[in-house]
Amino acid sequence: MNKRRLFFYTALILTLIVIILLVIGSSLLSLALDREESIPFGTLITWTGMISLPLAIYWGIKELRQPSRELNRILSRFIKIIIILGILWVPISYLLAGNLSFSFSEKETFQGGQDAMKWFWRLSYGIGIGAIFILIVYWISLIFRKK
């Protein structure tokens, strides 16, 4: 098995595990990683998914790694941006929430408040939806290319 396939299958398996854990609401998500119980294991699990989903798409489609058409070059750039956002998800989310459990309150200040929470959800959903959108656009382009 070559490196590319290993990277693809690893990212795909991690993505599937994360999705299953999040969908079933596993008790692992609320386990604490530290003694102060301020960092839930769910943060690490979700972060893994935020990185592995776009990586699985990137490593699974050769045209996103080595694009030959203009549309695929654009999609390649976008998937790379989404991968970077996935990697930066925890630091950005920490700046928004002010904590690693990513809990928000009714504060009037931006950090930890309702406006920051809206940006947190936009970032979180944007990574997943953006990666899936790129995959769908690529598939649609294949349909039109064959015709």
Image: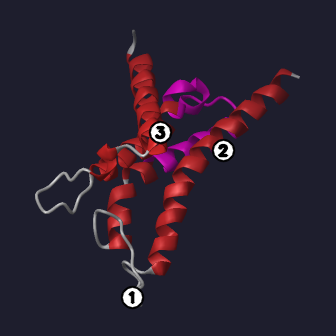
Give the spatial CA distance, label 2 vs label 3. Answer: 17 Å
- Is residue 52 visible to the viewer in this orientation of the structure? no
Magenta highlight on residue 90: no
Can you tell which mark lies on residue 109?
Answer: 1
Q: Are marks 2 and 3 in contact (CB under 8 Å)?
A: no
Q: Residue at x 61, y 31 (%)?
A: 67
Provide the secondary structure element on which disc 1 rests.
loop
Task: Kindly identify which residue carries mark 2.
Answer: 133
Q: Is residue 7 above or below residue 1?
A: below
Residue 106 in the image: state x and y as whole percent. 42, 84
Measuring from the top left, give residue 76's x and y in whole percent.
58, 39
Residue 134 seen anywhere in this rendered image of the structure = yes
> For residue 19, which numbered disc appears in the image?
3
Task: Say what amino acid the circle numbered 1 marks.
Answer: Thr
Q: Residues within 10 Å of mark 1 (few under 14, many from 20)?
A: few
Q: Nearer the viewer, mark 2 or mark 3?
A: 3
Tell me which numbered mark, 3 or 1, is placed earlier along the sequence.
3
- Region rendered in magenta: 57-83
Locate residue 120 relative to residue 103 in the image: left or right: right
Kind of element beneath mark 2: helix
